[in-house]
Image: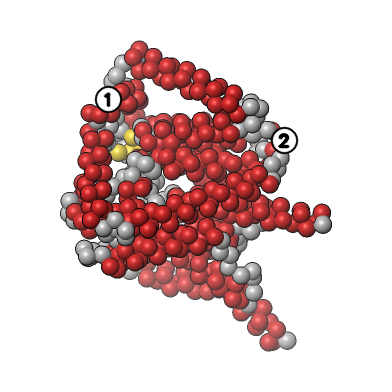
Amino acid sequence: MQTTRMLKIVEGEPFLLLVLVLLSAALGATASLLHPLLALVLLLLLGLAIIFFRHWPLGASGLMLLATVLDRYNYELAGRTIKIEYVVVVALWGLLLARQFLKGESKFYLSLTALFTLGWLGSNFLSSCISPRPSATAINDLIRLSLMVAIFLILPNLIQTEKHLKQVFALFLIVGIMESIFGLSALTLHYATGVNLGVTHIPSYPGPVPYGTLNASNIFGSYTMSVSLVFLALLLSPPSRSLFPGRWILRGFLITLAAMISSLARGAWLGFAVAAAFFFIIHRGFDRFWLKRVFLVGVIFAMALLSVTAVVYLLPKDIPLIDRLASFARLGSERTVVGRIAKYDLAISAWRERPLLGWGTGGMARVFGRERKVLAWVGNLEIHLLIDTGLVGLIVFALFVAALLFRAASALRKTQGSPFAAMLLSLIIGYIGILVAYQSTDATWLGLFWTHTGLLAAATRVIKMRVQSRSELLI
């Protein structure tokens, strides 16, 4: 009898929670030696982690989504930057493997898309190891990139049922709304009182812009843009296929759209326009014939362009939004555009010296030096991939994206008429918007990109399992 009770304590969730509590106590004691505010934050995070982990897997997935939007909060430890998302993904991996070992849960899921991702990560390691330009931060860069890929790999293993998929998707939308509200509130408060809770002044911008809990206004813009596109696709899906109330979806769309506009990020604006146009063209509810849809979308965007042009010429240019819109007519002389193009030219010249494998992770910093901060980073996604990993890395990354979208589109075709079809389509549209925005501000180094990618992969997997189970029932 005593042995049976002992097994019940040692096996499964009670044992895992006991480990977490003991770990929390140990880290709490360590935190008492640190700054009081840091100790309080650390203990609060540990308490939240126990709550989230207790509600597995929803809590774990929600914690991952939340951690990735708290990107600007970090701590320097032994010369390394520790972010919340790093700690969370390591803890989740440990807990997932422990559960599989102790409870005999399903084996780890690894799709073709995941294999391409690991191939791309491998190309980063290979390029970095053979690079003729050593980097003092190479190990840090590779660890950081590995943790980001780990986010993508773990989400499809956390989300395995329709119920959990719907819950995590709802959390994804709620986190997007919360981040948008925080950014808009920070901007309003800054204008009203001068207090800065997440606003930055960029010399080339006509006014202050929010970055919320993220590390840059451009990242804030691309993130809120992607969530806004998800809301847009959900908003225009048939009410019978909707997973959430229409009014809630409309409010979420307006809030995230306002946040995207307030970022003054032109890349995010273009990403929204391109992805929205693509959605209207493929969305059959817009019209039955695709050629007519293309024509109607062209007319709508032409009218929108004329309206924006009229607003720009009629309203005073001292309004930041109007001045930013007017900047599209003078892109050739815009300081940020000129600077980006100059960096692109330098990056391409450097890549031509090592076209196959590039210079290694953090290639721009390797070639030009981290002390030259202006040249230590290139914003375009493809050029960034080329200088880091060469043609090999670019091709493998392209295969990863193609496999992800192809598998999602295949699942979408098989589940037409289901509420989950609207979810999957909205995630695809949001992802396309991200890829367009990353033509000017690449953020594949951040968890936001990988959580969206991981959620898209998880939704694809769950929907494929749903279709397969229905086919087996019919047989």
Q: Quadrant of the C terminus?
A: bottom right
Residue 37 visible (yes or no)? no
Q: Residues within 10 Å of mark 2 (few under 14, many from 20)?
A: few
Quarter of the image where one finds residue 83 = bottom left
Dot 2: element: helix
x 60%, y 36%: residue: 234
Residue 4 pos. (x, y %) = 70, 84
Residue 395 percent location from the top left of the image: 41, 54
Is residue 429 visible to us here?
yes
Q: How is the image coloured?
A: secondary structure
How many numbered discs? Answer: 2
Callout 1 crowding tier (Cα within 10 Å): few <14, some 14–19, many ≥20: few
Picture quadrant of residue 143: bottom left
Name the residue tied to disc 2. Answer: 240
Is 45 left or right of 238, judged from the image as shown?
A: left
Name which residue type carries label 2: Ser
Q: Amino acid at mark 1?
A: Arg
Q: Is disc 2 in contact with disc 1, using a CB cutoff of under 8 Å?
A: no
Q: Residue drawn 26% across and 35% down? A: 337
Give the residue number, with chain letter if any, for mark 1.
330
Which quadrant of the rendered structure holds the N terminus? bottom right
Q: Toward the viewer: 345 or 429? A: 345
Q: Nearer the viewer, residue 266 or 64?
A: 266
Residue displayed at 53% across by 53% down: 403
